């Protein structure tokens, strides 16, 4: 498959942290708007960045970016996109939408228009019946300043869901934010790290993952693992790489405590 435009989403203010993480992984990224970082990659990289990104929220595949002043423009452009390359006749097609400072301000209407355009395209090329009983291929339709972006969500659950936490605590710090705080601090492996008000220990855990160079997503599954468009061998190789790059336990013990 030709080069893809991937998007890493992030909380506002953390874009520079995500850009640095991508640079460390070998990708040249740029912030295209607040909370949205773009970089060129391929299907193998979809697997790698989902496993390795620490401070990003999700990894998306951008299929289109275009002006959409009315619903006709939105429908017509979405219908021309190669949905059959990513979806099968039984794929579930959830559509999420949002709108900000745009002529098209009704999110439910945006979602209905995008869904109808996708279904029309798939019915013409794959099957007249689309039962939507298969794995979901989630679509995100975003309109900002009358410009529409159409994305596929490869992550599924947000990247903060690492897979290591079985219990939750009140006011728990999100893992992606904790990782960003560690990255923005002066801490590095070999230095002491003490969190005297650690709560459920998120900052200490994320620092340990960073210090041992352990891919934060290695214990979890991603939505795109069920997509036939992304070869299963890519995920296998990405996880093997993550295992190979993990470092031994830290010599300096990290300390966290709370009441």
Image: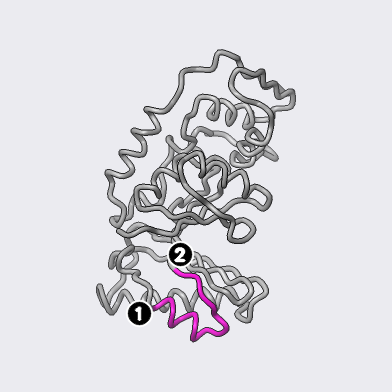
- Quarter containing the C terminus: top right
Camera-side residue of 34 and 74? 34
- Write down the quadrant of residue 169 in the picture: top right
Taking the spot 70% from the left edge, 21% from the top edge, the residue there is 194
Left or right, residue 234 beside residue 24: left
Expressed as whole percent of the image width and height from the top left, the position of residue 122 reads 31, 74
- For disc 1, the neighbor class at 10 Å (few under 14, some 14 to 19, many from 20) is few
Checking the image for residue 130, the label placed there is none
Q: How is the image coloured?
A: one colour
Instruction: Calculate the distance from the C-alpha at mark 1 to the C-alpha at mark 2.
Output: 15 Å
Highlighted range, magenta: 64-79
50 part of magenta stretch: no
55 lies above or below 40: above
Q: Position of residue 97 (x, y in %)?
A: 55, 68
Report which quarter residue 4 is drawn in. Answer: bottom left
CB atoms at circles 1 and 2 under 8 Å apart?
Answer: no
Which dot marks residue 139? Answer: 2
Q: Which of the two residues, 37 or 249, is positioned nearer the viewer here?
A: 37
Label 1, secondary structure: give it: helix
The image shows residue 205 at horizontal and vertical percentages of: 58, 28
Identified at 45% across, 64% down, the residue is 139
68 magenta-colored: yes
Residue hosting label 1: 120
Q: Residue at x 55, y 13 (%)?
A: 251
User: With respect to residue 169, does 69 lie above or below?
Assistant: below
Going 67% across and 53% down the picture, which residue do you hit?
A: 12
87 vs 169, left or right, is left
């Amino acid at each position: 498959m030709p080069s893809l435009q991937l998007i890493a989403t992030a909380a506002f203010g953390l874009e520079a942290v995500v850009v640095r993480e991508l640079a460390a992984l070998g990708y040249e990224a740029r912030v295209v708007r607040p909370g949205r970082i773009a970089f060129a990659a391929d299907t193998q990289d979809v697997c790698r960045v989902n496993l390795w990104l620490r401070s990003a929220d999700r990894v998306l595949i951008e299929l289109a970016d275009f002006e959409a002043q009315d619903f006709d423009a939105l429908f017509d452009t979405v219908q021309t996109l190669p949905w059959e390359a990513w979806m099968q006749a039984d794929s579930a097609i959830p559509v999420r939408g949002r709108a900000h400072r745009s002529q098209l301000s009704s999110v439910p209407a945006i979602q209905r228009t995008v869904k109808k355009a996708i279904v029309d395209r798939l019915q013409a090329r794959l099957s007249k019946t689309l039962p939507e009983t298969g794995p979901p291929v989630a679509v995100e339709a975003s309109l900002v300043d009358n410009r529409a972006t159409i994305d596929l969500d490869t992550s599924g659950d947000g990247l903060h869901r690492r897979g290591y936490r079985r219990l939750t605590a009140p006011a728990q710090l999100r893992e992606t934010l904790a990782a960003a705080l560690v990255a923005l601090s002066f801490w590095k492996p070999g230095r002491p790290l003490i969190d005297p008000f650690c709560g459920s220990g998120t900052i200490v855990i994320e620092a340990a993952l960073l210090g041992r160079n352990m891919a934060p997503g290695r214990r979890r599954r991603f939505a795109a693992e069920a997509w036939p468009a992304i070869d299963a061998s890519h995920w296998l190789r990405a996880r093997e790489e993550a295992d190979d790059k993990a470092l031994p336990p830290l010599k300096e013990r990290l300390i966290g405590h709370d009441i």
